[in-house]
Amino acid sequence: MFNTIFNSTAVGLDISTALIAAGVALGLGLIIAITHMTTSQTSKSFLVTLAILPLLVMAVMIMINGNLGTSIAILGAFSLIRFRSIQGNAKELLSIFFAMMIGLACGMGHVLFGTVITAIAVIAILIFSYTNFLEPNKKQRILKIVIPEDLDYETVFDDIFKKYTSKAELVRMKTVNMGSLYKLTYNITMKHGVKEKDFLDEIRVKNCNLKVLLSHPCLEEEI
């Protein structure tokens, strides 16, 4: 059904066919960039990369078509490329992989397949981004508490957790400052309607006003 537009029996690649593939790759790259722009905070340089990446991958695929040795060499080169100068998030990695996949499809002449996949993926991304589907519990938190070594960490916060949380699980404990302090890490779920400031204030009373950190799971930090 999704046939390639390239003529496998021809000696070379027809210029008009190559231009069609290039136009489709660039157009689909723009759609990917616009989709990423509407669903994420990003920069212009990254959007330009997403828009041009399918076209460049398509050109590479055309150049290495039928040459296994060159294909392996290009694959090794791709593995060395860093697409971003700073650590990116999962959605940026998804968009990069999306753009590369479309470029591969266009480079093999499957422009209709690439167009259909782009339409399906864009619709799915928009639905998942603007609805509550697959959205985690917004009340989930990571709680990190530093306590003195002589404090009984197993029960000292039970009354506070019972008052402010619906779930509190100790997931990690380690000693710091030459063993004079403990650092406790909890996965907690806050109750609806409670004030996080009051929660932290009561913990500070219990832990002698040492460091306390309350963060979202995706923004976990060290204290």
Image (cartoon, rainbow, N blue to C red):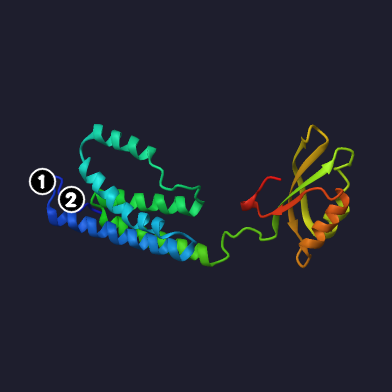
Please name the residue shown 41% across and 47% down the image. 83
Please name the residue shown 81% across and 38% down the image. 181
- Give residue 128's position: percent from left, percent from top: 51, 62
Please name the residue shown 40% across and 60% down the image. 44
Amino acid bearing label 2: Phe
Quadrant (top left/top right/bottom left/bottom right) for the C terminus: top right
Amino acid bearing label 1: Ala
- Quickly name the residue at label 2: 6
Outermost residue, left side: 11
- Quickly name the residue at label 1: 10
- Asked if marks 1 and 2 touch (Cβ < 8 Å), the reply is yes
Q: Is residue 39 above or below residue 145?
A: below
- Give residue 118's position: percent from left, percent from top: 36, 59
- In front of the other: 167 or 113: 167
- In front of the other: 66 or 198: 198
The reply to whether residue 81 is visible in this rendering is yes
Find residue 96 and name its label: none
Label 2 neighbourhood size at 10 Å, few (<14), some (14-19), many (20+)? some
7 vs 102, left or right, is left
Label 1 neighbourhood size at 10 Å, few (<14), some (14-19), many (20+)? few
